[in-house]
Image (cartoon, coloured by chain):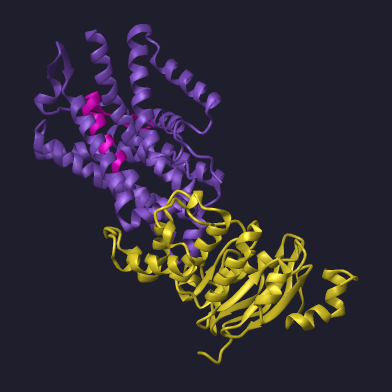
Chain colours: A purple, B yellow
Amino acid sequence: MSAVILLLITGVGLGALYFLVASGLSLIYGLMGVLNFAHGSFLTLSGFLGWEVGRRVGDGSWAGLLIGMAVGVLVGAGSAALTELVFIRRLYNRHIEQVLVTVGLGLATVALFEGIWGSDPIQIKSPGWLSRTTEIAGVHIPNDRWLLIGAAVAVLLLIVLFLQKTSYGLIIRAGVENRTMVTALGIDVRRAFTIVFAIGGAAAGLGGVLASVYYGQVSAHQGTSLLIYAFIVTVIGGLGSLSGAAIAAVIVAVIQQFANYYFGAGDLAVVLLLAVVILVRPTGLMGKVKH
Amino acid sequence: MSDRPALQLTHIGLQIGGARILNDVDVEVATGEMVGVIGPNGAGKTTLFNIISGVMTPTTGRVLLTGEDVTGRKVHQRARVGLGRTFQTSSVFPGLTAGKNVRMAAQSKLGAATSPWKFPRRGDDADVVAGRCLEEVGLAHHVDTEAGVLSHGDKRKLEIAMLIATDPQVVLLDEPMAGVGSGDVKGLMEVIRRLHQGGRTVLMVEHHMEVLMDLVDRVAVMHHGELLAIDTPDAVMADPAVQKAYLGETV
């Protein structure tokens, strides 16, 4: 029983990390139809810069981590907005070119990160509390999972609040449903595009810093490996659906944890789940058919 | 400005690859006029609308809105100059309530859309405008209804409410009656008439002849990408070239 509780909570913690990456992917696809293969690079860059700034503030201290998280959010938002303005903006409705550019950007930036920080993972220090455990119902839960879950819930709530309650959120929701009509009403939807990219990048950036805490290291390949799971989550949740991404992130991560523990086949289980969802429900859990 | 035509198309041509879609179309529409656009399928009516609204760029020619050359402008910029349009298929936002649909349009006009952090409230400016526009098309009771579940005729009315909210000077209606049940036609005609009142200029593609002839001041006939004739409904109906090309010999 205690193994089940442990796997469930650590699974949700990993799901939180997946969600931070997948939320941006899903929003960006939902509004613009862009599959952003460079999304992992926002995460990696944020992880590195958050760590660089954080360790100078106080290596392994809470102040260092919190400032690192803030840096991660800013770097993620900035690099994503820049990517949209410089590359994606010229390529709307040209999906093949979008894929080529974002894949290329993803590969080139990983090489760049390797050039700057080396290709070996760098071990990092976190606040002591995060590497300890908390006992719940006789089960020792690693504390960093709580940080991940808290951050993902906060990001989900903030994005939902933004989408549901602000004027801009209304434009973005309308843009997801019918982009042409939004422009016909006199609204420059491109600005909404940049904002959505920045929001997605910010979530990924936060995810980058938290991923380095979770894995205890930063590496040039962190974003790329997480991006694969984030894409799977996005497809299972339904492309463009934020709540779908949240639910799918938890399902994928929990199944992965259980399959790893009992069969040592977590990745295989995730790919099988993906195959089943695509066969049974091609639009994903919460996805709508795109017009 | 008022002595200038609301809409002026000069030598509009569109060539895609080897295909000539539009050829040398000249149209002048006076302020406050309602003009119908007819022609067989593929004659270039919707393409012409797309060129006027900026969805497509013409190969030749210019588009002038109230005397201002907007040929190189983007869709949302033309909308800000005062051009509104509906689409052949209904273009409401199905997942939003009717009230939110019109609110979007009102926000765009009021400029609130440019402030990302503004929290919309019941009773603010955009909300008042949205309520008034819904009332004008007779949909006030549907303010909290999801647009996707409205009847087709009501969706069309909702689109017009959204148009009114942006307060356009020139309006393009692309087959507003398409797919509308016969019970809704009268009500929708009334809504279009009211849209036209107050000096708005209206261009309307419509296959429903009775409706069109009843509403418009002039009719433009498109055929194979060219403007065959533009005149009063009676004169156009009597034009032998039009009869031959479009209406058939029997009319």
- Taking depth in this image into account, of A46 and A279 the one nearest to the observer is A279
Magenta span dominant secondary structure: helix
Q: Is residue B193 magenta?
A: no
Image quadrant where residue A269 sits: top left
- Taking depth in this image into account, of B114 and B35 the one nearest to the observer is B35
Considering the image in quadrants, where does the C terminus of chain B appear? Answer: bottom right
Q: Is residue A101 above or below residue B23?
A: above
- Taking depth in this image into account, of B155 and A24 the one nearest to the observer is B155
Q: Is residue A172 above or below residue B60?
A: above
Q: Position of residue A130 (x, y in %)?
A: 14, 25
Q: Is residue A132 above or below residue B105?
A: above
Q: Position of residue B247 (x, y in %)?
A: 83, 70
Is residue A55 shown to the viewer in this render? no
- Taking depth in this image into account, of B147 and A262 the one nearest to the observer is B147
Q: Is residue A278 above or below residue A261?
A: below
Q: Is residue A220 magenta?
A: yes
Image quadrant where residue A107 sits: top left
Q: Residue furthest bottom?
A: B3
Image quadrant where residue A258 sits: top left
Q: Position of residue A89 (x, y in %)?
A: 46, 55
Range shown magenta: A202-224
Report whether B45 appears left or right of B115.
Answer: right
Question: Which residue shows up at 16% across the image and 23% down it?
Answer: A143
Q: Position of residue A232 (x, y in %)?
A: 44, 29
Report whether A116 appears left or right of B65.
Answer: left
